[in-house]
Image (cartoon, helix red, strand yellow):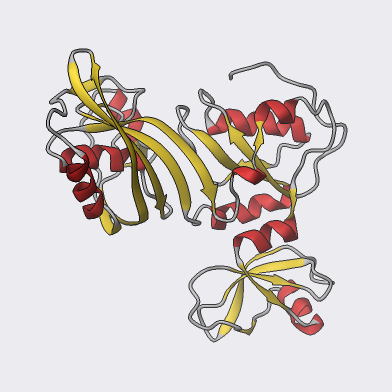
Amino acid sequence: MPGSAERPAAAPTPDGLLVVDKPTGWTSHDVVARARRLCATRKVGHAGTLDPMATGVLVLGVGRATRLLTHLVGCDKDYTATVRLGQATLTDDAEGEVTAAPGASGVDRADVERAVAALTGDIQQVPSAVSAIKVKGERAYHRVRSGEDVELPARPVTVSRFVVGDLRTGDADGTPVLDVDVEVTVSSGTYVRALARDLGTAVGSAGHLTALRRTRVGGFGPDTAHPLADLEARQGAPMPVVALAEAARASFLGRSLTADEARAVGFGQRVVSSRPGHGQPVAAFAPDGTLVALLDESGAQARSLVVFAPASS
């Protein structure tokens, strides 16, 4: 793991979300391992992996807030990225070896804008072969790196925003390339590496990522993210976690429960839905503002997805 360990906090960190600005070169697992020491608890997880090359917002759950993570993974996300047109790599990013170099001579902004338009909206995306998706029980990236050809099926994703910024021509190992800065907003499960690959194909060439930064996960952006070095420099001071109730309010639609409803939900009982047909989790709060549960309100009766408050509350 990069860096050296710092001494842990004097006492376990309270339940909540710790939003980290992940540095390049670290895996998400590296950051979780460091956070476990800083927070003095083993109960730390993350809401969505960032590749080692990538930087930016990594949401960690501490204590009972780890139970929010499954539902936070489904939030949409913002990224800034640089796509290099003219070269393909094994991993669809700069960490993989170059597998094709058709070049990007003659590709201009109009070509890029047309290709981006076709990759915006509800699309079918083939994930990057070097990914954590399991194929017959084994991660796809293990199979690829052992020399196996892996073909993953396309799956539906949503690219709700795909904006083209600066374009720069250049040369990479004798190949004319075009570097394109982009900003995207994507649904859970979207591979920005795969967008780079498909953008290259759409302009009649090839493409891969050379830079990636995640700037938002759900309700958490760079203003709430703490550089890992700053957290380590706290030297045992309390970690700046977002409290459980505040984290839920920032991430999900909320619902206020009556005292009777809060008691029933705490026992795992169903209550009348406030938003029948709503497909996303709803955070339910007791009259005193305590987070009681996440509810599934898609039916006439709301059922608990996760219960936080004790049944006696």
* 276 is higher (above) or lower (below) than 128: below
Q: Nearer the viewer, residue 297 or 178?
A: 178
Q: Residue at x 47, y 48 (%)?
A: 78
* 135 is higher (above) or lower (below) than 122: above
Q: Position of residue 71 (x, y in %)?
A: 55, 58
Residue 157 at least partly seen = yes
213 horizontally vs 151: left or right: right
183 horizontally vs 272: left or right: left
Q: Nearer the viewer, residue 273 or 236?
A: 236
Residue 224 in which image quadrant: top right
Q: Position of residue 155 (x, y in %)?
A: 29, 54
Residue 151 at least partly seen = no
211 horizontally vs 216: left or right: left
Name the quarter where the C terminus is drawn.
bottom right
Q: Position of residue 132 (x, y in %)?
A: 40, 38
Q: Residue at x 52, y 29 (%)?
A: 27
Q: Residue at x 84, y 72 (%)?
A: 288
Name the quarter where the N terminus is drawn.
top right
Q: Nearer the viewer, residue 108 or 57?
A: 108
Q: Position of residue 3 (x, y in %)?
A: 64, 17
